[in-house]
Amino acid sequence: MSRKPLIGIPADRRTVGKHYFHMVGEKYIRAVTDGADAVPVLIPALGPAADLQAVLDDCDGLLLTGSTSNVEPHHYGGPASVPGTLHDPDRDATTLPLIPRAVAAGMPVLAICRGFQEMNVAYGGTLWQRVHEVQGHLDHRDDETKPLDEQYGPAHEVLLEPGGLLRDIAGSNSLTVNSLHWQGVQKLGAGLKVEARAPDGLVEAFRDASATGFALGVQWHPEWQFEKNAFSRALFGAFGAASRRYAENSR
């Protein structure tokens, strides 16, 4: 019997107490194990010291997670962040070079929230750092004073592009999604094709139209209680199936 695919998940580098830790949220790990039926492999945020070729050689898929940190704006020529903004330069230095190499290799890639934003930056795109302050855009932030179920509850509709992968997975023209982000796509990266937009026109999902494999990013959080959402189950199922095909063809 063939083994389950290995899906790499780049970690955040955080200080806990007086020590650094490389961490991945359990909800993403569970979405890989139970949603994609795959084995999660945590990739430490080692920056230039990371052996990216080893990741490409050993993994069958790549999941880029959400985070409370933001991509450093110098990576896309953006203005300095508001004081107090959390950054993770070690994660940036790990994921930004890894993303295009994984896609070029045909490895399935699923990017979520921060991962969606860093994928756009890796393709040469730019970001709004505070979407709620941009005229004509909705407030896409969550209310952190509320319980998690409310923070991650349905927030707004996204319209799925005709002929897109998400419309095919969803079997519908729209979805209702959660919304927990300050940043958003300002300029779409080269080669990325819009898959979904919010009612204010903000890009909420895209794919690499020229990729030979599954290469998709979403701004919302499908990993949150994915088992209760038919679309989220289908999304992680499709990602897992693509990773299995990649494993079978590359071994």
Image: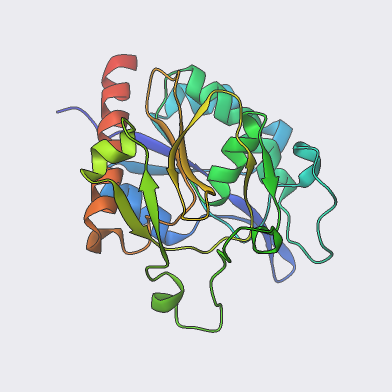
131 over 49 or under it: above or below = below
Residue at x-position 75% and y-position 47%: 72
Q: Number of labelled discs?
A: 0
Q: Which is more toward the observer, 81 or 133?
A: 133
Question: In the rendered view, does 13 fall on the left or right side of 138?
Answer: right
Quarter of the image holding residue 246? Answer: top left
Colour mode of the rendering: rainbow
Question: In the rendered view, does 217 fall on the left or right side of 69?
Answer: left
137 over 142 or under it: above or below = above
Image quadrant in which the C terminus is located: top left
Image quadrant in which the N terminus is located: top left
Q: Position of residue 157 (x, y in %)?
A: 38, 58
Q: Which is more toward the observer, 220 or 27?
A: 220
Question: In the rendered view, does 244 fall on the left or right side of 43?
Answer: left
Quarter of the image holding residue 121? Answer: top right
Q: Position of residue 17 (x, y in %)?
A: 70, 71
Residue at x-position 57% and y-position 37%: 119
